[in-house]
Amino acid sequence: MNGNKFKGNQVKKTYRKRKDEYVYDFDEKNDKFGIVTSIAGGTHLIADILDENNNKKQVRAKIMGKHHKKVIFKKEDLIVINCDGNIFEVRGRVNDDDISKIKKQFIKEEETSENTGFTFENETIDFDKI
């Protein structure tokens, strides 16, 4: 025993390093791109993903353990979500090369979904007959 009560001269632990937050191996079968809409607290967040028909779908996804408290996800971040049945898990952020391509997909979807209102032409309702 060297008399050092707190073991100050030991080697620092390496597991506290920042994890790689970007996803470089995108699996087209199970992975989908998403955009963070809100943080649900704890290890969950709410994100919009594009389904097969390029429609937005809001899902609640779990942050992987290796990213929890090590990678901070903010609103409007582009992320990769692993979809395995009804379980959605955040794999990480979209890498810098694909960001512009993914943003264009979400912008196209928003432009097409704006004109979904109802239009009525020359219809009047007579409340006396009802």
Image (spheres, rainbow, N blue to C red):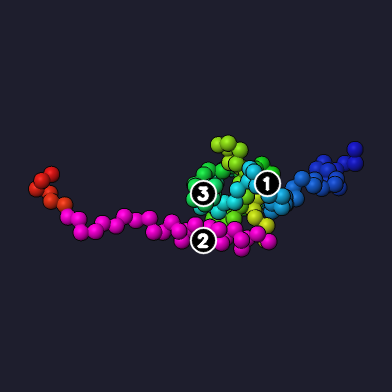
Residue 79 position within the rendered picture, expressed as x and y whole percent measured from the top left: 61, 52
Q: Nearer the viewer, residue 13 or 71?
A: 71
Q: Nearer the viewer, residue 116 or 94?
A: 116
Residue 112 position within the rendered picture, expressed as x and y whole percent measured from the top left: 45, 58
Task: Using a 10 Å C-alpha cutoff, classify the residue at mark 1 as few (fewer than 14 neighbours), some (14 to 19) or many (20 or more).
Answer: few
Could you tell me which residue is drawn at 61 percent across and 61 percent down? 101
Q: Which residue type carries mark 2?
A: Ile
Task: State which tag comes first along the sequence, 3 or 2.
Answer: 3
Tags 3 and 1 in contact by the CB under 8 Å rule? no
Could you tell me which residue is drawn at 49 percent across and 50 percent down? 55
Judging by the rendered image, the residue that carries numbered circle 3 is 53
CA distance for labels 3 and 1: 18 Å
- Tag 3's secondary structure? loop
Residue 54 position within the rendered picture, expressed as x and y whole percent measured from the top left: 52, 52
Res. 80 in view: yes
Could you tell me which residue is drawn at 43 percent across and 56 percent down? 113
Res. 67 in view: no
- Tag 1's secondary structure? loop
Judging by the rendered image, the residue that carries numbered circle 2 is 107
Judge left or right: residue 41 versus residue 114.
right
Q: Which residue type carries mark 1?
A: Asp
Judging by the rendered image, the residue that carries numbered circle 1 is 27
From which residue to which does the magenta span run? 97-124
Residue 62 position within the rendered picture, expressed as x and y whole percent measured from the top left: 59, 42
Q: In front of the other: label 3 or label 2?
A: 3
